[in-house]
Image: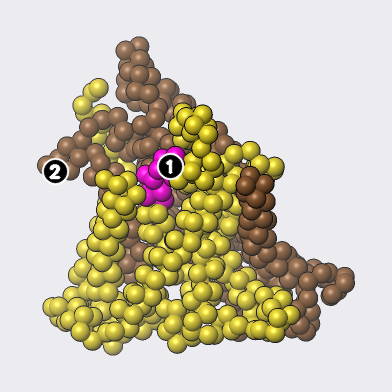
Chain colours: A yellow, B brown
Amino acid sequence: MNFKHKYFFLFPGLFVLIGILIFPIIFVVRLSLSGWNSYNPGLDYIGLENYIRLFTDDPRFWESFFRLSFLSVTTVILQYVIGFALAHMVWKDIKFKRFFRVLFLVPMMTTPVIMTVIWRTFFHESLGPVNDLLSVFGVAPKWLTDPVIAKFTVIIVEVWQWTPFMFLLLLAGLLSLPKEPFLAAAIDGASPVRKFIYVTFPLMAPISIGAIIIRLIEASKIMDTVYVLTSGGPGTSTETSSFYIFIKGLREFQMGYAASMSFTYLIIMIISLTIIAKVLTKVLLKE
Amino acid sequence: MNKLYIFLKYFFIVIWTVFVVAPFLWALTTSFKDFQSVNGGVTYIPWVDFEPNLEGWKVLIKSPAKGGVDIIEPYFNSMFVTCTASLISIILGTLSAYALSRYTFKAGFVKNNDITFFFISQRIMPPIVLSIPFFLFLSSINLLDSLTGLIVVYIVLLMPIAVWIMVDFFNKVPREIDETALIDGCNPYQAFLKVVLPNSIPGLIVAGMFCIIFGWIDFFFAFILTFTEVQLLPVKIVALNSSVTPWWSLSASALVSVAPLIIVAFIVERYLSKGNLSGAIK
């Protein structure tokens, strides 16, 4: 194939992307070395002061980071298990197959913030239906104002919103599997459970890894849900990294410090996602 | 054993269906309530528990001057931004994906896979990292609070998705069809436009649907980069969530915002059943 034409295909997209992104990325790095805040807006140079403050004097950032890790890992595991189960159930013929498939996809088509507003009314402590139904048992959990329960409320909403995405990826994977291994298993008379453990699951391993990584990437960006549902509260009990950076940067206008947190956060994310991808590949593919 | 499995299967499906549907049903009943029926205690069934009225829906199309919310303009803004950004992303993304699938690139240690990864890795970037520089960048070129500015930002969000899906899709379209076209005397652009693209319509549709989903559901950038001139639907609706929340109009607007994407769900499912999405996922 001709050599020169390939650049005409590749470059428009690549250059638009780089063109839009190059300024922001360089700017974040430069901004992180400045003391830009509301009293002193401007790109002065203060060296690594922001980073020193971040690593020695800001437990709140690290707490929010561990909280984020807990929330995203928990939600992704739940989404994977539920998503796989659902995909496996509507994979083969069941009644109203298309209806269930569409229905299970719908939550992911809804705007997270808008649905979270609805969830807020849903979990409202005195006027919401959840506590109204639970009052039969005489309990009334404080869904949004108890530091521990609020975390689970966030998890419930995230699972509702994003399990469909996992379901979609896994169902697409299941539908693309070759038929022969299943025929062989059927001839050997394998039970459904054994068929799942020895045939379906190993065949799905590469797709599973991809789906888990994609969801981890997206889950780590969780911010809208928290903003609307609990605003990080009560106290800081549901505050995630993104939300903390948002508060520092665009509420308190400590732009320089927020930029240094953004950059640190980005580096940590890239490193940890790479490690997770490696570990998952090793465990699931047994390489 | 088998009966137990089938029982558990339907049991689980029913539970999940209830979980999926519950917030929608709740929004639906709430949208017909008024101040009294919301604050007087929890009620579910119209006419039995409370007297339904259409106030929540009427408010949505009234102009703000008459105490309404007027979501029509934000609605069309949202549609315009989402569709334009998706279209541009699909065009640029498809071209790049075709190049990455058919030709080999090498610049130092950078190879095809690294370029593909560069595209896709843009999704790793948390929106918050980009928001502050985008804010200053757009204000420096006077695009803050404008539709054009938002489209520029959304292209960054959506192009990675288009590239990700289309690279895998083109890898599945046999190379022979382009080669035959080239032998028949097409130049590479004709081969791409007249032969490869018509064979890639399912992939383009899936990529387009994904772009529309992820464009439509974005809140964060619209929230930070627009104020009063231009408002997108999610920002407008969340702004309703103030101290005295009008649950009824909130619920009605939420349902209105979900409606167009239900069609997208049907299209995605259709192509999923045909097995066309499978190539899109690695």
Quadrant in the rendering for residue B190: top left
Q: Quadrant of the C terminus of chain A?
A: top left
Mark carried by residue B109: 2
Span of residues in magenta: A199-211
Residue at 61%, 83% in the rendered image = A141
Chain on which label 1 sits: A
In the rendered view, tell whether residue A188 sits above or below residue A89.
above
Q: Residues within 10 Å of mark 2 (few under 14, many from 20)?
A: few
Going by the numbered disc 1, the residue's amino acid type is Tyr
Residue under pointer 1: A198
SS majority, magenta? helix
Q: Is residue A203 a member of the stretch shown in magenta?
A: yes
Residue at 45%, 78% in the rendered image = A238
In the rendered view, tell whether residue A138 sits above or below residue B179.
below
Going by the numbered disc 2, the residue's amino acid type is Phe
Whole-percent x, y for residue B231 in the image: 53, 65
Residue at 49%, 31% in the rendered image = A188
Chain on which label 2 sits: B
Discs 1, 2 touching: Cβ within 8 Å: no
Identify which residue, B35 or A274, lies in the foreground.
A274
Residue at 76%, 68% in the rendered image = B29
Quadrant in the rendering for residue B126: bottom left
Whole-percent x, y for residue A20 in the image: 31, 55
Whole-percent x, y for residue A202 in the image: 40, 43
Whole-percent x, y for residue A170 in the image: 48, 46
Q: Secondary structure at mark 2?
A: loop
CA gap, disc 1 and disc 2: 39 Å
Q: Quadrant of the N terminus of chain A?
A: top left
- Find the residue positioned furthest to the top: B184
Q: Secondary structure at mark 1?
A: helix
